[in-house]
Every structure is written in C-alpha cells, then in structure tokens.
Amino acid sequence: MTSEPSTPITAGAAGTWKLGDREVNRLGFGTMRLTGNGMRGNSEGAPIDRARAVGVLRRAVELGVNHIDTAAFYFSPLRSANELINRALAPYPDDLVIVTKVGPGRSPSGEWLGMAAPGQLRGQVEENLRQLGRDHLDVVNLRRTTQDSIAEHFGALAELRAVGLIRHLGISNVGPEHLAEAQAIAPVVCVQNQYGLGAQLAGTESLLEICGAQGIAFVPYFAIAGDRREAPTGVARTSEARTGAARTSEVRASATPDGEVLAVARAHGATPAQVRLAWTLHRGPHVLAIPGTGDPGHLVENIAAGALRLSPDELARLQPPPRHSGEA
C-alpha cells in the first residue's frame, strides 16, 4: 500500500458510522500533532510550518475525511489546532463533523491546571466556538481525569446542549460505569479511550463491546503508536494512576511481537502503522480511527489503511492473548 495505488485513496473505504445524526467516514483525522503543544509524546521540537499544517488539513478533507478531532487545549505558543482548522477549512463543508473536548484546563503558558469545575465548562465550550468560528459545536467530549463520578460535569454539558451550543455529547477516558452514568443524563454518541494494538487499558474490550451493542461510536487514541503519544501530560497518565482502578491505572502491554506486525505489513505491501490502523478498524463497525500527522505523505498512508483488509488468520496472529486477573 506504499506504492502507487490502483484505486483512488479515500477515507470512505473504511465505511461509515453515525455520531448522532451525523454520518462520518470511519477514518478521520486528529489535530493534536499539528501544534507541538506540550502533550505527552508531542512536545519535542518546533511545531510544523503553519502553511504545511493548513495544507495537511485541506488535503485530509480532499481525501474524504469528514471527522476531525480537536480541543482548545491543543496549542503551543505558536499554534492552536482550532485556529488552524478555522483557517484551513472555513467556511466549513456541510458534511464536516468537528469533535472537540473539554474538561482539563491549561494556562496560556501551557501549564496543566487540572479538571475544570462544572460551572467553568461553558467557558471552555465558548472558547472552542470562538476559535473555530462556529455558533455551535457538533460533538463535545467530556474528558475525564480523576473523578469517580462524571454526573455533575456531564450534566453541565447537557444543559449547554439543551440551549443549542452543543449538538451531541461524548465522553473520554472512562469506564462502563461512567457511560451508564452519562447515558442516564443525556444521549452519548461516542466514547474516546486509549486503545490500540499493543496498548489497551484493562477492561477496555468490554467497554468497546458495550458501545457496539448500544450503537455508540468507540473512538480510540493511541491507535498507531500505542502508549507513546496523544494523551495530555499530567492529565491522562499521572492522574489515571491515582484513581486506583485497574482499568485506568495500568496499560496492558501487548504480547504481539513487532515482528508479527511487520510480517503482516510485508504481506500486504503496507507499513506497520497501516496494519495497526487496519487492526483497530477491524474491531467493529462502530470503531472509528483519528490518526494525526503533520506529514502529507503519512496522511495519505493513514487514509489508505482504511482499504486494508486483514484475514482472520492475520487478525489472530496480531490479537494479543487475554490477560488473566492477577497478572502483573
């Protein structure tokens, strides 16, 4: 898949799913890596050239991406993911769904401030609206940090949904009990959790299955790079370690050897990253992928992965064995 394709590359090759009433291609785009923004695994070096970032966003949409993931806290001193989206894509295509997230706060200098109070979430929503140049947000994920209950925070977002600032709601960094808690307040259209070949939080498989049974999109981060990028420093990692819950405090290291991934990749003329993306998409029709990159070539490779079909034997080779209770 790294050579010149015989058929056009399009994000639609992976199929579609609905975020509420909005149909999206299952292969989307995450903007975190465009900014060099102090997120874990993404804080080294300068952010990519602004014109290049704008070009990558426009190219993604040209290739059929209509689901873009972002957040107001994706920023560096030189770049804001939301403002890059605004510059690149406004006026927005009618079919484009922009998904943002709120919860953790960051100071203008980039310092993490912890979880916002429920009453502060409106300010975060309005900041996303201002940066994106929108009068409403398509989907807003509540990004949980350490709290056992998300009811008060999710309820605050449900109120903003009721007045029209938000169209649909999702949750992130959660377990099944948080999904049930949120669903009792307002409909949840997506769950965004750490998940990928080689990095699954304990218990995430059951949450993935619950989402599928309820028609809720499951949107992994770490779909390509495992435990090496995409989560907020001091929010996802260090705070989860304080919850005491095995599901969120311990990442299961996959027993899948890199050699198996490479062998499958070679058999398809693909890259290991493409195999990891394809594996993720094979986990269910409700599973979406939002790989991010600032490299135009990698963008094309990521989108091409949506057409990669793995055989049952290949999936069995890649699937890590289940971890039994009590294992270290």
Image: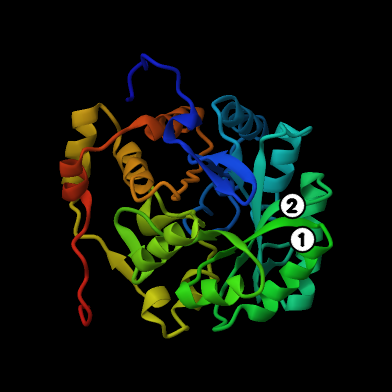
- Asked whether 62 or 116 is in front, the reply is 62
Give the residue type at disc 2.
Answer: Leu
Q: Which residue is mark 2?
A: 137
Which labelled disc corresponds to residue 151?
none
- Asked whether 53 or 134 is in front, the reply is 134
Q: Which residue is mark 1?
A: 125
Say whether residue 96 is left or right of residue 46. Answer: right
Residue 252 screen position, x and y as percent: 29, 67
Residue 156 screen position, x and y as percent: 74, 73
Residue 47 in sight from this viewpoint: no
Residues at marks 1 and 2 touching, judged by CB atoms closer than 8 Å: yes
Residue 9 screen position, x and y as percent: 45, 23
Q: Secondary structure at mark 1?
A: helix
Q: Secondary structure at mark 2?
A: strand
Residue shown at the point (40%, 56%) measured from the top left:
228
Q: Is residue 200 above or below residue 306?
A: below
Residue shown at the point (49%, 53%) measured from the top left:
219
Give the residue type at disc 1.
Answer: Val
Residue shown at the point (81%, 59%) measured from the top left:
126
Residue 321 in sight from this viewpoint: yes
